[in-house]
Image (cartoon, coloured by chain):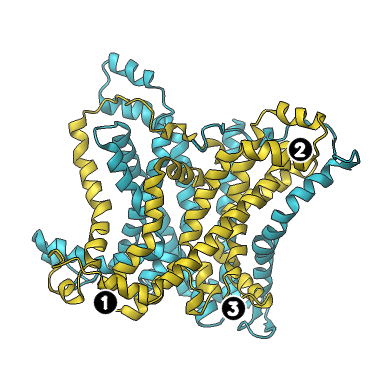
Amino acid sequence: MARSDIQPRTLDTYAKPEPATLRGSSGFQFPQWLVAMLFIAPALLLYAIYVIYPIFQSILYSLRDWSGIGAGTYIGLDNYKEALSDGIFWRAVRNNIVLVIASIAIQLPIALMLALLLSAKFPGWRIFRAVFFLPLLLSTVAVGLVWINIYDPVFGLLNGILGAVGLENLQQSWLGNESTALPAIIAVVCWQYIPFYMILFIAGLTTIPLELYEAARIDGASGWRSFWDITLPLLRGIIRTGAILSLIGSLKFFDLVWVMTGGGPNRSTELMATYMYEEAFASFRMGYGSAVATLLFIFAFVIAGSTLIIDQRRSNR
Amino acid sequence: MATSLPTSSSLDPGNPPQPRSFRSAWLYGPALLWLLAAGLPFAFVVLSSFKSVKEYIADLWAMPASLQLSNYLEAVEGGIGRFFINSLIVTVSSVVLTLVLASLASFPLAKMKFRLNRPLFLLFIAGAMIPVHVTLIPIYTLTNRLGIYDTLLALIGPYIAFHLPLAVLIITEFMSHLPAELEEAARIDGAGPFEVFRRIILPLSTPALSTVAIYTFIYAWNEFVFALVLLSSRSNMTLPLGLMQFSGEYSVNVPGIMAAVTLASLPIILFYLVMQERVVAGMVAGAVKG
């Protein structure tokens, strides 16, 4: 198994004491830090070019009125003022928040239920797991194209099913209505990513000693009791991990919305990332797009920072 | 977060069945329901891909009259082969180079003591938090300035860079748990640091490397945003971008789109079916990245 030998550990234990220098085969001694840096340099260079530098560059661009050609003009914080007083921007922020909350509230419970089902290892569970897992492997473009056609008002599978079971009054243009477009996309997000949290929970479940369940059964506890008193408390750490991942992941959402609705109808599915993309690459307002990107970075930074601080507090306790 | 990750040994197929306080019969209901929810779209895609447009529009539930391959032929004529090759080139180069760069960087981070060790490690893994969209505009202008806009080369840099955080985390963790005696013995025999890395540490790290390889492969194969921003001509498109292109051109030809979707997804699904456990483990390891 790929990861079976990796033990969880804290960050401070990764460096073991070593001799101060490494001896080269020639007998000449390089200082250890220089040897280390030579190993790290190629990765660090690429990482600096494509991850670190662009963040600062984005901040610089965001201070300009700039179409992407020439240098543009310096306009201070005007782009930020515009974004923060722009209803569409806040609509995108709100949609991002709805996406986060819905993701956590829908995906995690269903994923936990599926994990519990599969870990009971009923006959044929492996086939079930294989199918459950499939959506996670597809590209979001493929997923989006498939679901556009499932949601199609006239020829789509969903309205077809509703019609077949006599719920014609629920049939509608799922992606065409402002009120249903975002929920429809959230359903697809869940469809694709529940398997991810499911395997996370399956892995977590197997760390719970079976003796606990045995003991509970002997004490006469019902299945529900042992779920509430054993499974849930012992899975708390992994559930929290899942929630954090869901939180960070939802800021990265773009593909599915871009493919399925392009942010519409009437901005009802606009996210920060899609808004930024449209402004920068469709309207060629690269300066303004950079300001939106920088705000996105600030959100990500604040979320990551606060989860880190909460983590620290917990481990210090 | 990383510290709370489970080990994947729990996903081993060899685990004995675990009795839980549920009865099997009760489990099938919800399990079947989700099987339907997860599987139905796949059935819809595959069945539709064999229909003619007429058949598709006429009756959603009808089986295709015959297994006609015309949609698949059309996708091939539309150049899906080219997209496939482009995706393969970009994905394989990204995987190989990610492994090389990440394992080189992980070796000193795991095995050497120097002042910048912890700051550099944290700098690398912090990248997992950054939404790629923050970097899109600068990477777009940079790519233009480097003169590699609309080439496959344009994608490889960002793909590697954004996979380094997870790769460095996984490989460093793994290497730091390798016993120190082995490298010490080699060092006494006069091996330099690079030889220790190449002869001792690297071969022992294959489990971590394969996890990173699988994870990077799946994500690079499916990546869309960078391709959207950094490529423009049809002959350079990767599969996800090519699928978008098809869907624009085909519009009402839904069976044609479904055939293209099937062809584009088939390699990853086959890959998964062949090495299920490893892929599952790789994706769990990808948890940090989310």
Q: Which secondary structure, mark 1? A: loop
Cα distance, mark 1 to mark 2? 59 Å
Q: Which secondary structure, mark 2? A: loop
Specify few, some or many for label 1: CA neighbours under 10 Å numbering under 14, 14-19, or 20 or more.
Answer: some
What letter labels the chain drawn in cyan? A
Residue type at tag 2: Met
* Res. A49 image quadrant: bottom right
Residue type at tag 3: Met
Check contact, mark 1 vs mark 2: CB within 8 A. no
- Disc 3 versus disc 2: nearer the observer: 2
**Label 1 or label 2, whichever comes before in sequence order:** 2
Residue under label 3: A286
What letter labels the chain drawn in yellow? B
Residue type at tag 1: Asn
Vertical relation: B285 (above or below) B48: above
**Do marks 1 and 2 share a subunit?**
yes
* Res. A205 image quadrant: top left
Check contact, mark 1 vs mark 3: CB within 8 A. no
Instruction: Please name the residue shown 28% across and 42% down the image.
Output: A127
